[in-house]
Image (cartoon, rainbow, N blue to C red):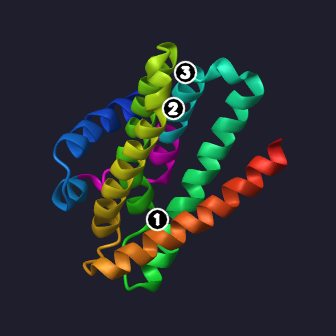
Amino acid sequence: MNTTPSITDTVMNMVNQSIQVLTKPSVETFEQYENKGTLREAVIYVLVAAVITGLLNLVGGLGAFLSGIVVTMVGFLIFTYLVHYVGKSQGGSGTLDNVSYTFALFWAPINVLFAVASLILIITVIGIILVPLLAIAALVINVYFAYLAVHSSMNLRESGKIWITLAVAFVGTLVASLVISGILR
């Protein structure tokens, strides 16, 4: 008997959990869900979001669509691995499953919402001016949720350790993404 949930069940469960995380953002909310899934479920959820985002941005062509999915997936994996590794060096006790699952719960829906909003703004001529502001807003929102997710998933309580973890993971992921983007071009 196979007890592994289907991809559809996994995604629907995570959508419901994401709604809770996004509408009731707190360390406690993240802690309710950090043990509900694994890296496998996180990767499935992020992959689904990457494909949806790619379809919304298909204007750049098939190559841009495919490289966007690769960069998204590799970036997510590098970021969560770095959060786990650096968080452990800062005294954290979470697992890679906790980190990846927790991050997927906010990261995937925020990126899909950003892609939808960007598409709507680009369609309108005046909206093009607002896309950079939307990108800044998405960044700020992601940082806020990332802070809560590190606090919860790595069980770090000191603000400085959380910021160090996020900063190192961000820089490492940025460098890796630039290298990957350069290779894919």
Tell whether position 20 is magenta: no
Badge 2 amino acid? Val
The residue furthest top is 124
Is 89 left, or right, of 60 in this rendering?
left
54 in relation to 39, above or below: above
Where is residue 65 shown, x and y percent of the image?
A: 68, 28
Is 46 left, or right, of 34 in this rendering?
right
Q: Which residue is mark 3?
A: 56
Distance, label 1 to label 3, CA atoms, is: 30 Å
Where is residue 12 shown, x and y percent of the image?
A: 34, 29
Q: Which contiguous range is marked in magenta?
A: 33-45
Mark 2 or mark 1, which has the lower sequence index? Answer: 2
Tell whether position 40 is magenta: yes
**Who's the residue at 60% across and 53% down the image?**
75
Q: Which residue is mark 1?
A: 96
Label 2 element class: helix
Badge 3 amino acid? Leu
Q: Are marks 1 and 3 in contact (CB under 8 Å)?
A: no
Q: Which residue is mark 2?
A: 48
Q: How many marks?
A: 3
Mark 1 or mark 3, which has the lower sequence index? Answer: 3
Distance, label 2 to label 1, CA atoms, is: 20 Å
**Who's the residue at 16% across and 59% down the image?**
28
**Who's the residue at 28% across and 61% down the image?**
148
